[in-house]
Image (cartoon, rainbow, N blue to C red):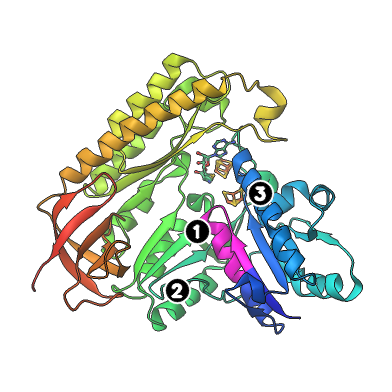
Amino acid sequence: MKHIYIETYGCQMNFADSEIVASLLQKEGYEVVSDINDADYVLINTCAIRDNAEQRIRKRLRELRAVQQRHPQLRIGILGCMAERLQSQLMVEEENVSFVVGPDAYRQLPSILARVSEQGVKAAETELSTTETYADIEPVRLGSNGISAYISIMRGCQNYCAYCVVPYTRGRERSRDPETIVAEARSLFEQGYKEVTLLGQNVNSYRWKTEGEEVGFPELMARVAEISPMLRVRFATSHPKDLSDSLLEVMAKYDNICKCIHLPVQSGSDRILKLMNRHYDSAWYLDRIAAIRRYMPDCSITTDVIAGFCTETEEEHQMTLEMFRKVRYDYAYMFKFSMRPNTYAEKHLQDDIPEAEKTRRLEEIIALQGQIALENNRREVGKIYEVLVEGESHRSKERLFGRNSQNKVIVFDRHDVMPGQYVKVKVVDCTAATLLGELCTQ
Ligand code: SAH
Ligand code: SF4
Ligand code: F3S
């Protein structure tokens, strides 16, 4: 009765958490299986960021009823942000869910699983913590390519952007001991990994304070980068309000810190940014973009944006498009505003942009961004990049794909190259999403 199957939805932090969950349960004798039919427990690590993220989980729960009919002993548990948001109510709404465990309660999973099976009861543990960072847990890398891995460096968020559920589902912000982060990165490098991504909802707020020691994010980045020039270091996500020059300086100094910054803009309108409680305006944001370009002319910049936030006018939507034209992002995650329960927006604002209008605005942003990405990629043709090879191209076994420092995917003929190697590739063609290259003979 000890086989677990884990399914993960949502952001990179949820994927990192699933690896912590796997580790915690393996230590207690549970085995992670890759076929749901072999499982005694299905753990679904969920996201609550938009309503459609939650609808997807509910649909998945309906599908799982068929699996439960074939395997009546199967127990389903909900982890992550939806578990935290809905707590035990979720087990009332979804009858086939046996347990609900929030993001700070994963250490209790072994005892919860035992209780659920042995006593046939349902269980919910959703208390948030101000200190839990799982710093001592060595994650079990799930579905890993053995080349690149996530390292969670902080948890929680207290920025309270008006639209966002994360402060309610992840609790207070807290940073993890830098020693444990550097040790985890070093251990990954020794196991053959070539790339680590340091994760937090707002990595610029990373701060570790003990007597006589204070470590901020730039210093942490430097420490991880010092492990080896052969270890690439990435990070996500930065909040524009505190993207500091000292971070940019450190990024520029180390070749192995990847030249890519994800800087969610959310809107191009100052009135909307204020309403969103983002603590910056468009001038500040553009100043930060200029600073990035000053320190690292070759840095790629990506973003998140929300179309149709409460009271957004057509003119304000146009300001978002204008922002996209000014910054010329390399990639963007683009969303329609989704009203989330308990947020500032839900309590104080009206979700007054009709669905069809939100869709139109979103599609306009998507179309513009597609055009910009293609134009940006065309400028890459002729350049030579160092590429970390990740695996076979999905289309052809004869081709490999990897990424350059800027996080752009490059596909090229494999010759005798192996995944995990660094190679020089010359860009010869492109689409909006991918660069096509030729291997350079050294
Ligand atoms: N901590 C990160 C973002 C985490 S959520 C940051 O602050 O940048 C990822 C993205 O989802 C956000 O940047 C935002 O663009 C989007 N998002 C969050 N809440 C949303 C909502 N209620 N409706 C639509 N998009 C939302
Ligand atoms: Fe949400 Fe804002 Fe925190 Fe990002 S910074 S997780 S958008 S509240
Ligand atoms: Fe979703 Fe929670 Fe991440 S709401 S985006 S899984 S922090």
Q: Name the residue under label 3.
A: 59
Relative depth, front residue between 134 and 295: 134
Q: What stretch is highlighted in magenta?
A: 6-20
Left or right: where 284 falls relative to 83? left
Residue 17 falls within the magenta-colored stretch: yes
Q: Name the residue under label 2.
A: 185
Neighbour class for label 2 at 10 Å: few (<14), some, many (≥20)?
many
Q: Which comes before the other along the chain, label 3 or label 2?
A: 3
- Residue name at image x 66 percent, y 77 percent: 38
Relative depth, front residue between 283 and 57: 57
Q: Distance between the residues labelled 1 and 2?
A: 12 Å
- Residue name at image x 73 percent, y 74 percent: 40
- Residue name at image x 39 percent, y 33 percent: 285
Q: Which amino acid does label 3 sit on?
A: Lys
Q: Main secondary structure of the magenta part?
A: helix
Q: Name the residue under label 1.
A: 199
Residue 259, numbered label: none
